[in-house]
Amino acid sequence: MGYKWFKYVKLVIFIYILLTSCNNSEDLTLGSNFIDNTTKIFQIDTFTVELSTVIIDSIITSETRQALVGNYEDGELGKITAKYFSQIVLPGFTDIDEDNKFDSITIVMPYNSYFYGDTTIEQKIDIHLLNEELWISDDYYYNTSNFEYQVNSIGSEVYLPRPVRDSLIEFRIDDQIGIDLFEKLISDAEEVQSNDNFQNYIYGIAIIPDNSNSSVIGFYQSGMMLKLYISTSGGEIDLENNQTVYNFAFSGDQFSRIIADRSGTILQTLTNREESLNSNLTKNRSYIQAGTGILTKVSFPYINSILFDSDNITLSAELILRPAIESYAGEFPEYLSIYLTDENNNFDIYDEDNFLGTSMFFLDEKYHKETQYTFDITQQIKDQISNGYFDSDLGFLLAIPSPNFSSTLERLIVSAEQDPDKRPILKITYLEN
């Protein structure tokens, strides 16, 4: 039994070597010990692969664990502004007496190490109280959701982002906000007797960046809060300052609003999902970015009719994409997700029916020539062949995978040039009897 299994393994390995050793224009006759000696293996990688850029209408940003705040002007994709909106909840308990004294109130924003842009430039953020209650007509907030906030800031901070080196930023806000909270807690006012009451008293906050071109910074949502410092015992003691600290967490409804101003860029004509901007119009490149809804669409306008020969058997189909040289200036996404789509570019990051999987990624750090993302689309090509024709409306959309799709601004520029080292490839291997 063991010897037969060993022979089977040798057979599989040998066939694999034969399959992977075929050249573009060569065929290979298999030995008669394995298969009919008239059978040949062919590999074709000269199909036309069209790339285009697509933008989707909105992205859910209320179910991420990351708050994005900042401004950055991307030379390729335009000016991106990220604002953060959140409700605030009461501390778990308070024990404040009339002889206690108010000390200060601060806002705490813990870094989560994510950034997009230039962190060597200072930026300013302003804290505003909301003018209206956060509410939604469905279950989610999106990157396009927006709520009114008060014109006057209750606090601001100019800081040099250090998302990798430091753990957090903490800065003081308007004392009057803290004094009002302090007095209501002492008197056990109706506004602080429940979270519902509290959120009718303070609808929430908005964290707004200034217009400087610096960076967008990621913060842990779970650690963001207002901290009320008072001089008394009870509560959670801050031994260093000999103070009591009450934490008003940013919780409940919260989301990042992410707006991209693409005016003056190569993508400025893209305004809705149904449009596709062919790479011929974007300097032989296509684009992908999380957070702002930019996707690359792949289509195959011409498929060799030989594949539809009933005597031929498709063995594999691979889509291979190379990044444009401009992508080497930043970090590459570790992998990409691929989805089936149609002529209207329908897309849902959570749609399991049209999700086909993720790519493999190889990084050529030395020569920058072999870096590529590879997708297995064998079944989709086989399905088209079995139908007897190739549906011209069939397409594939490539995206930054979830959860980064909703919580970061990761991006990739894909090459659509026709140079051998840069062109997109559809590689199909098939048996011919």
Image: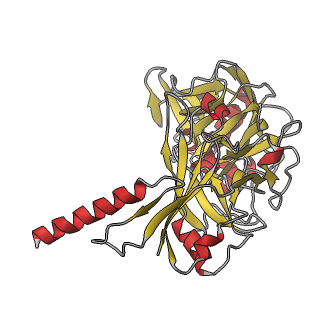
Return the residue nearer the eye: 427 or 377.
Answer: 427
The percent coordinates of residue 14 (x first, y second) are: 30, 60
Image point 72% across, 23% down: which residue? 123
Image point 79% across, 28% down: which residue? 210
Q: Is residue 106 left or right of residue 176?
A: left
Whether residue 99 is visible to the viewer of this picture, yes or no, is no
Image point 67% across, 77% down: which residue? 389
Report which quarter residue 33 is drawn in: bottom left
- Asked if 78 appears above or below 426 in the picture, the reply is above
Return the residue nearer the eye: 348 or 17.
Answer: 17
- Asked if 104 appears above or below 417 in the picture, the reply is above
- Asked if 277 appears above or below 218 in the picture, the reply is below
Colour basis = secondary structure
Return the residue nearer the eye: 184 or 305.
Answer: 305
The percent coordinates of residue 25 (x first, y second) are: 54, 55
The percent coordinates of residue 185 (x first, y second) are: 62, 42
Quadrant, the N terminus: bottom left
